[in-house]
Amino acid sequence: MTATEKTDVLIVGSGFGGSIAAYHLAAGGAKVTMLERGPWLSGKDFEHDYLLGSSYTRVFDFVAGDGMSVLGGNCVGGGSVVYFAALPRAPRYVFERRGSIGRRMWPASISRSTLDPWYDRVSDAIPVTQQDWGDVTYAGGLWGAICDHSGHTANPVPVGVDNARCVNCNWMMAGCRFDAKKSLLTNYLPAALAHGVEIRDLHEVQKISRADNGDYRVHYNNIDGVDYRVTTGSGEIDAKIVILAAGAGATPPILQRSEESLGKMPYAVGRYFSGNGERLNNAVINDERVAEVLGLRRPNGVAYEANAIGKGPVVACWDYVDGALPEYERFSMEQLYFPPGSARSWPRRRTRRARAGSARRRRKSSSSGSRGSRSS
Amino acid sequence: MVATPDFLDDVQKMTLEAYADTIVPGVKRFPEDHAIAGVCDDPGSVEAGVLELLADPATGVTAGLVPLSGMLNQHAANYAVREGLTLDESLPAFVALDYDHRTALVGQLVAWGNPERDGWVLLAQFSNMAFDIAPHRHTVEALAEGHPGLTALGITKPDEDGLWRFPDFSYGRELAKRHPNTTASGRPE
């Protein structure tokens, strides 16, 4: 029988929640081990391919649950590998929100002012780039022109993208082939590795218990690198500190499975979920009207025809980002090319991919066709 | 032509094709093509390769195809009785329905409250996926073969190394006024 492995800090998940903590703790001298459910991929692994099993499916995990389905990053770097890298700061009023009994909902110590120094630090590390109109894609420019024509303002959005490297391929949800998107694979994780952090991919944490000496004991399964439904082994690691950063969907069940050893969890664990706040609306672009009404022309003479060109949201209308408006009437509007695909689930309710989208074509009886993918 | 799975018999293939054609309709492949209703004048999910996709074990639905096709024909037969329709007995019941009736039945199958809903929604999603992204093929190869969905979506051909790059990407001029409460670093206050 082999002795259980030991580490100072065991971090579950290598996304934004885990990686930044991993770096700071390791830089401070702790022995840090990270367990990540998904594979460890990098630039050359990120493909421009919708084929099942390509990076477009490997970097995601889709869980079709009972009442809630979760699509999340499933790889070293987590959501940062698949995100659209639009990084505006939350406006001041967000933190002043009061609930139905009039109490401020955020802890008193958290406000835009107290967060700004931390925003600054993360903005330097990622780094976040302020864009100008010359940086924004045709889709962003079109959205800006539409906002302007309808009497609204529009801003180029701060992004975690190195525009000098970006080729506007629009494949950023499959992971960035060109290291232009500033995922955690390009900043915090290399820094964490330089300070000795050990990252183990394809390790899915099941539960946490207590060891006899009072340490936490983290129980994991090894996951097959091709079919994430297949378990290839299991093990345990003891740690003085455990940081659970497995994502909003995966952290609660780990806690719930740990109740036998750790005790009853608070009532809110596994409840009160929220979507990520996005509503996606389709836009069908009429190129002739883009030219006539908005006066837009590309160098090749066409007005737009550029839905496949670009990256994530690059231009936003912030006219409704206004604390003076009623609570449910505040929002930002951004353009986005949402890659085609379709959410799907597995018989065992676990999958390594999913995307949503649809295309509709002209019926014989229909005079006006539409085509396009989701956008927001 | 696209490959079709050899574990399905002709009735099962036709039935699943007819379901996919209800989701993303297409043009008939030949005059006596019963599976495709023919309400569209260009290729749809069937010609996009839906059966090839469904046969890929990575979809997780492959083992359910035979029972799903049988259930679909049973539902279609029951539907015909309810609607007072007389079906061509030489065809699978669902295939014998015309497009509007196929659509009405599929609408019932994917409706909230139907205990079988998840299975029919999955089948509809794969019918869409086959057309939208052809996940049973390398995208570059599917495009080169003129895949109908990728072509309809306007996906252009990539560079020689199979990667997409768009050096021409921006109008390059100011197209709106910035929000007055924008901070110096370009963020909302």
Image: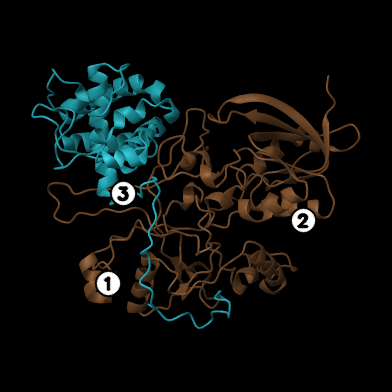
In this image, A213 relative to A373: left or right? right
Discs 3 and 2 share one subunit: no
On what subunit does the disc labeled 2 rest? A
The correct choice, above or below, for A233 with respect to A197 in the image is above
What residue type is disc 1 on?
A: Arg
Residue B152's mark?
none
Q: Is residue A282 left or right of residue A272?
A: left
Q: CA distance from mark 2 to mark 1?
A: 48 Å
| Disc 2 versus disc 1: nearer the observer | 1
Residue A24: assigned label: 2
Discs 3/2, front: 3
Residue A129 spot, x, y in % from top left: 56, 68
User: Which chain is disc 3 placed on?
Assistant: B
- For the point 32% across and 43% down, the residue is B132
Of residues A244 and A42, the one drawn nearer to the viewer in this rendering: A42
Viewport quadrant of the C terminus of chain B = bottom right
Residue type pointed to by label 2? His
Q: Is B173 or B121 nearer to us in this picture? A: B173
Question: Are the residues tagged 2 and 1 within 8 Å (C-beta)?
Answer: no
Question: Which hue belongs to chain A?
Answer: brown
